[in-house]
Image (tube, rainbow, N blue to C red):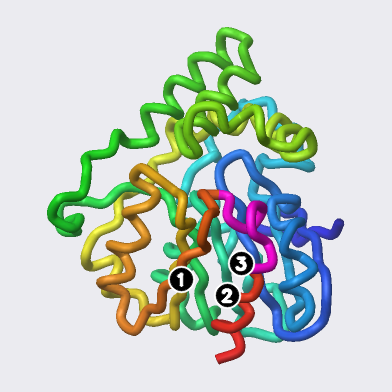
Amino acid sequence: MQSFRVNGYDMAYLEVGDGPPLVCVHGTLGDFRTWYSVLGPLSKSHRVISVSLRHFFPEHWDAIGDDYKMAQHVADTIAFIEQVKPGPVDLMGHSRGGHIAFRVAQARPDLLRKLVLAEPGGDLDASLSVPEGTPAHPPLAAKTIRSVEMIRAGDLDGALQNFYEGIEGDGSWRRVPAAAKQQLRDNTLTFLGQINEQRRPYTLADAQAIRTPTLLIGGGATTGSLSVMWRVLAEHIAGSKTAVIPNAGHWMFEQAPLEFGEVVNRFLAE
């Protein structure tokens, strides 16, 4: 484990492999361990740099303070990438981390060579319409609010199960390996910050502003809003490419690491 000093915070990261830098940003409840399953496939041709965002493990945050904000994490990621040499870098984000990566590409395209978004999280505003006939999906924010209530009541594992099954479906929590569950537990209190992170919805202008060559990846078995978001964004990011990982859900890189690594490596090599 190493760290860069960014905006007054020691931002931890794990580095594996040699070659051009690929910076990887985890999502909700994640940390630099999120990408363990694909470190092997990705590090064959890249120097993989997996970061832990502000207040995530290895920090054990007490949920005190008001700097758990989307804008703060975007600014931290920009400041981190500025210290990675040589640049520009390839940037990959999953879920909430995909939202962060999107905002980095929007604000500082000069820092990036290519962008990979694995089911980026967030909401679409009225300027981005979903395909006709798409079922209405309740926003994941409601699940987060419920999980926060459960954490405050002392039911930490119940909060994690509520959130996870809100994405992967009823009964999915019991199939999560013990090590993966522990990683999520290590970051449970970050939920308390996320409730007021001030994440802005994606707009049509936001998507059209992305000029970095972009790959958007979805899991073939993902349901709900996360299965729709990346497809809508792909329609409006100029020249973007898409890929689906068959029989995998939102945590597709854990469920199908070889297939995921192959898709990413192929895009980055183009």
Q: Are marks 1 and 3 in contact (CB under 8 Å)?
A: no
Q: Horizontal placement of 109 versus 207: left or right? A: right
Residue pictured at 66% horizontal, 40% vertical? 55
- Mark 3: which amino acid? Phe
Residue pictured at 63% horizontal, 10% vertical? 154
Name of the residue lying farthest toward the front: 247
- Mark 2: which amino acid? Val
Q: CA distance from mark 1 to mark 3?
A: 9 Å
Total tally of numbered discs in the picture? 3
Name of the residue lying farthest toward the right: 1
| Quadrant including the N terminus | bottom right
Looking at the picture, tell me which residue is in the foreground, 24 or 223.
223
Residue 253 on the magenta span: yes
Please say whether residue 72 is visible from this viewpoint: no
**According to the image, label 3 marks what residue?**
260
Q: Horizontal placement of 263 versus 18: left or right? A: left
* Residue interval drawn in magenta: 251-259
- Find residue 99 and report its image quarter: bottom left
Please say whether residue 237 is visible from this viewpoint: yes
Q: Horizontal placement of 70 versus 199: left or right? A: right
**According to the image, label 1 marks what residue?**
243
| Quadrant including the C terminus | bottom right
Residue 263 bears which disc, if any? 2
Relative image position of residue 84 (x, y in whole percent) = 70, 75
Q: Are marks 3 and 2 in contact (CB under 8 Å)?
A: yes
Name of the residue lying farthest toward the top: 153
Q: Are marks 2 and 1 in contact (CB under 8 Å)?
A: yes
- Indicate the secondary structure of the residue bearing disc 1: strand
